[in-house]
Image (spheres, rainbow, N blue to C red):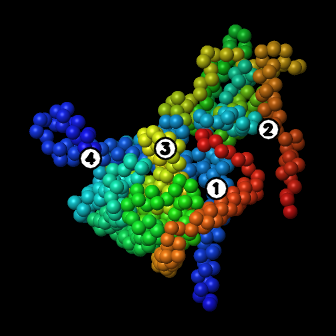
């Protein structure tokens, strides 16, 4: 009798397991796919969903750039080239070149850290594909412009104030007061 | 047919002295070409797209949806791509056999369409050995597959071809034995005769005629899947062990022919099951208009076939591939003995109730409905367990 019951048991097991398996796949057939159809069929652009401090392609707000060259010195691979001249008449700093080679940039963020005004900062833009290396060099200065001169009090120029606020907010999110780590990272879960 | 031939000769399109035989031959050639080019090949292509969409949804993906509306024209793009590819014939291969093999597989796929009973009058040839013809010509695939495996002069191809041959020859036996119960009950091998012996209502189908035919229908379906090299039984094409099996050395159009035949065979599998067990084109007589009636019958037949095609896609997305010893065990230790039991059981049943048992049809149909209800309840259980939204919209 052992062989017969094993034979019937095998048939029963095969039929019932296929029955359950088909039920599982049928339930999956009725669900919404997980697929994110990235470039063109997104409900919102990916760039808009990324955090404020996301390290995307670098950008410079020339309106608040002081021409201090801190970013150029900080860059470990020299992808930033800045030329600053002193205007002989007005004795003011004049920015005549501010190039960032995005092809070289490794998105380390060391340039945006020492910037006093948050002028150089990463954007959430990450789609950097291009047809030539030359076109990846971002030239921010078209015509020579005056460097920004920080004021004693709050910024009064209504055109510059929002840009400066944004830059300072960018810096605030980076710096941790006292050089301490955030509390959440200190506690190791047991 | 005769009036068509007479009219064609009278119109003078074939010259004044055209013989009726010659004109009839030309008409049959043109008609069959229209059927193959207009129905069989597009069907195989569209199934390849539909299958990928169905698997994708079962695996929580989207599938091809870029070429045309919802990716519907993907099969045309794939076909054009394959035609444009280089037709590589290996130096060490047996070139004539290598070139011929895809056409033999294609032949095995096109021949069954001659006896495809689309409706009560829409059939190319209602042979009195219809179902026997169907099973014989579909078995021609094994010749093409074995030829491809041998002529490629490649170990993977050879093993794939031999596996396929062993599989098709083995599963011919339960498939053939599962056809016998229906033949015993109808006393005919003609496709139309078998369909006419059934009714349009489910309780008059041979699927629910008695418990033996129900089991036979399931065995025939699984055996047909095995003969068509479909997944749980696609050992000849097992990618992980045999690259692409007998199709390893093929490229371009010849490669496409193998897969067109595989997808097209789904329709033939569905048609055999629908004819033998699901009442074929039977539809209630709602109108006296012959043309309208034929259209309704053709729609009924195609819907039944397409449901079976969908089930085979669903099985392919569900079950893992079996091992070669499991494949043989399933065939020889389970399907063959059970098929014999079915055949003898049906013979006894027919001896006791020569005109069939009407009550049994209702009981079996009720049982099938109960089984379907249990299945739906299981599906709802699995849906609830994962707390995910139900999304019936096929477009995404």
Residue shown at the point (47%, 47%) measured from the top left: B297
Chain for disc number 1: A
Answer whether labels 1 and 2 touch (C-beta < 8 Å).
no
- Inter-mark Cα distance, 2 to 3: 71 Å
Residue B49 on image: x %, y %: 49, 47
Occupied quadrant, residue A176 = top right
Identify the element where label 4 is drawn.
Answer: helix
In the rendered image, which residue does mark 4 sit on?
B28
Residue B83 on image: x %, y %: 33, 45
Residue A18 on image: x %, y %: 61, 66
Chain for disc number 3: B
In the rendered image, which residue does mark 1 sit on?
A26
In the rendered image, which residue does mark 2 sit on?
A174
- Inter-mark Cα distance, 1 to 3: 29 Å
Viewer-side label of 4, 2 = 4
Among the two numbered marks 1 and 2 on one chain, the one whose residue lies closer to the N terminus: 1
């Amino acid at each position: 009798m052992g062989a017969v019951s094993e034979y019937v048991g095998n048939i029963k097991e095969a039929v019932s397991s296929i029955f359950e398996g088909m039920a599982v796949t049928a339930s999956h057939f009725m669900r919404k796919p997980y697929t994110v159809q990235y470039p063109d069929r997104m409900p919102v652009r990916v760039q808009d969903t990324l955090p404020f401090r996301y390290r995307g392609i670098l950008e410079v707000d020339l309106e608040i750039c002081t021409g201090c060259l801190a970013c150029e010195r900080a860059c470990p691979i020299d992808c930033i080239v800045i030329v600053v001249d002193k205007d002989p008449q007005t004795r003011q700093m004049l920015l005549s070149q501010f190039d960032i080679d995005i092809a070289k940039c490794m998105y380390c963020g060391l340039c945006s850290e020492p910037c006093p005004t948050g002028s150089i900062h990463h954007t959430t833009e990450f789609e950097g594909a291009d047809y030539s290396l030359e076109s990846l060099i971002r030239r921010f200065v078209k015509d020579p412009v005056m460097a920004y001169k920080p004021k004693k009090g709050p910024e009064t120029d209504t055109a510059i104030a929002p840009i400066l606020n944004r830059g300072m907010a960018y810096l605030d999110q980076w710096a941790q007061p006292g050089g301490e780590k955030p509390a959440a990272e200190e506690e190791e879960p047991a | 047919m005769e009036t068509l031939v007479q009219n064609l000769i009278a119109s003078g399109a074939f010259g004044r002295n055209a013989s009726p035989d010659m004109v009839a031959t030309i008409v049959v050639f043109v008609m069959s070409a229209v059927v193959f080019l207009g129905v069989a090949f597009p069907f195989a292509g569209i199934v390849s797209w539909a299958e990928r969409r169905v698997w994708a949804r079962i695996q929580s993906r989207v599938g091809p949806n870029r070429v045309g509306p919802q990716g519907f024209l993907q099969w045309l793009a794939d076909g054009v791509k394959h035609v444009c590819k280089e037709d590589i014939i290996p130096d060490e291969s047996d070139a004539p056999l290598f070139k011929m093999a895809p056409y033999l597989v294609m032949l095995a796929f096109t021949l069954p369409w001659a006896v495809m009973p689309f409706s009560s009058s829409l059939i190319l040839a209602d042979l009195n050995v219809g179902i026997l013809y169907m099973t014989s010509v579909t078995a021609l695939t094994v010749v093409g597959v074995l030829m491809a495996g041998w002529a490629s002069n490649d170990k993977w191809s050879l093993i794939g071809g031999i596996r396929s041959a062993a599989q098709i020859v083995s599963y011919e036996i339960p498939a053939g034995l599962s056809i016998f119960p229906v033949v015993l009950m109808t006393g005919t091998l003609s496709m139309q005769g078998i369909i006419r012996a059934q009714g349009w209502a489910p309780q008059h189908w041979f699927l629910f005629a008695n418990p033996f035919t129900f089991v036979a229908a399931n065995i025939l379906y699984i055996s047909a899947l095995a003969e068509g090299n479909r997944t749980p039984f696609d050992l000849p094409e097992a990618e992980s062990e045999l690259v692409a099996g007998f199709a390893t050395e093929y490229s371009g159009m010849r490669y496409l022919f193998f897969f067109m035949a595989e997808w097209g065979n789904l329709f033939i599998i569905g048609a055999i099951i629908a004819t033998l067990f699901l009442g074929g084109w039977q539809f209630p007589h709602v109108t006296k208009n012959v043309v309208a009636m034929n259209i309704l019958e053709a729609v009924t037949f195609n819907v039944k076939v397409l449901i079976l095609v969908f089930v085979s896609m669903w099985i392919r997305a569900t079950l893992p591939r079996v091992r070669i010893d499991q494949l043989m065990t399933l065939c020889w230790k389970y399907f063959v003995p059970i098929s014999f039991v079915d055949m003898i059981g049906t013979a006894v049943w027919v001896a006791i109730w020569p005109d069939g048992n009407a009550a049994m049809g209702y009981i079996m149909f009720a049982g099938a409905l109960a089984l379907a209800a249990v299945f739906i309840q299981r599906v709802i259980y699995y849906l609830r367990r994962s707390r995910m939204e139900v999304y019936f919209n096929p477009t995404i």
